[in-house]
Amino acid sequence: MTFNADPVPVFCVLLAVACIFAGCTGTAPPRETDTIPADDFRGWNLTVNGTTRASYTFDEIRAFPTKAGNCYAVSTVGIKYGPYTCKGVLLTDLLEQSGGIAEGDQVWVSAPDGYLWVFDYDQTQGEGFITFNESLREIPSPPLQVLLMYEQDGKPLSYDDGGPVRLVIISEEEGIVTEGSAWVKWVDTIEVKRK
């Protein structure tokens, strides 16, 4: 018996898996210049577009009220990243500066490598995520928050780890694992899509 697979659907499935996997483990996008050290974020800006549009430098992001918490992720193939202690700015604080978000709205978070993750309203409020214990058994979700992280384990987030800022899901509790697909590296654009 011979099996002939149509290469187009097989390619599409492989491409979809690669796109999902890229959010947590993607390769760093090329930098525009080799004259700036990899972890010097001069020239980087974050654009937040809601009812108003704002652009923030790295120093301006660090001037927002800070939040710290525990973060721990698992990739779509079961590789764990963490646990880490994370520090940064709450996504809700950034959104509030650009007109906020209402039920039914979505938040599109993207990076220069082309990766995009869409959060619904509930997720921006820390709800609707699947959570696991350290053995990767699904558990009821404790209170969560979405954080734009710039510091990991007391050190500035490196470029290779997604710096200057990376979106992560945090908890006050230790050992709470979330899906890594939503952990967007090298975030440079956050946009509210109104319903």
Image (spheres, helix red, strand yellow):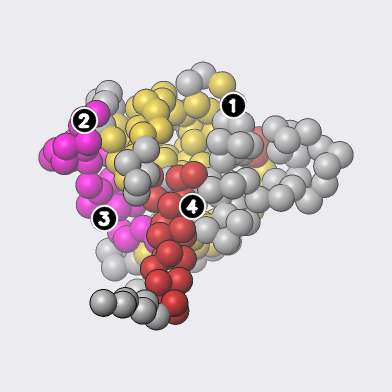
Disc 1 to disc 3: CB gap under 8 Å: no
Q: Earlier in the sequence, mark 1 or mark 3?
A: 3
- 70 relative to 166, above or below: above
Q: Earlier in the sequence, mark 2 or mark 3?
A: 3
Q: Amino acid at mark 3?
A: Asp
Q: Residues within 10 Å of mark 3 (few under 14, many from 20)?
A: some
Please state which of the two labelled residues, at mark 1 or mark 2, is closer to the viewer: 2
- 158 relative to 19, above or below: above
Pointer 1: what residue?
156
Please state which of the two labelled residues, at mark 3 or mark 4, is closer to the viewer: 4
Q: Residue at x 74, y 48 (%)?
A: 31
Rounded to the nearest angstrom, the CA distance separating label 3 from label 4 is 24 Å
Pointer 4: what residue?
22
Query: Which residues fall within the magenta stretch?
Result: 118-145
Asked if residue 59 lies left or right of residue 17, the reply is right
Q: Earlier in the sequence, mark 1 or mark 2?
A: 2
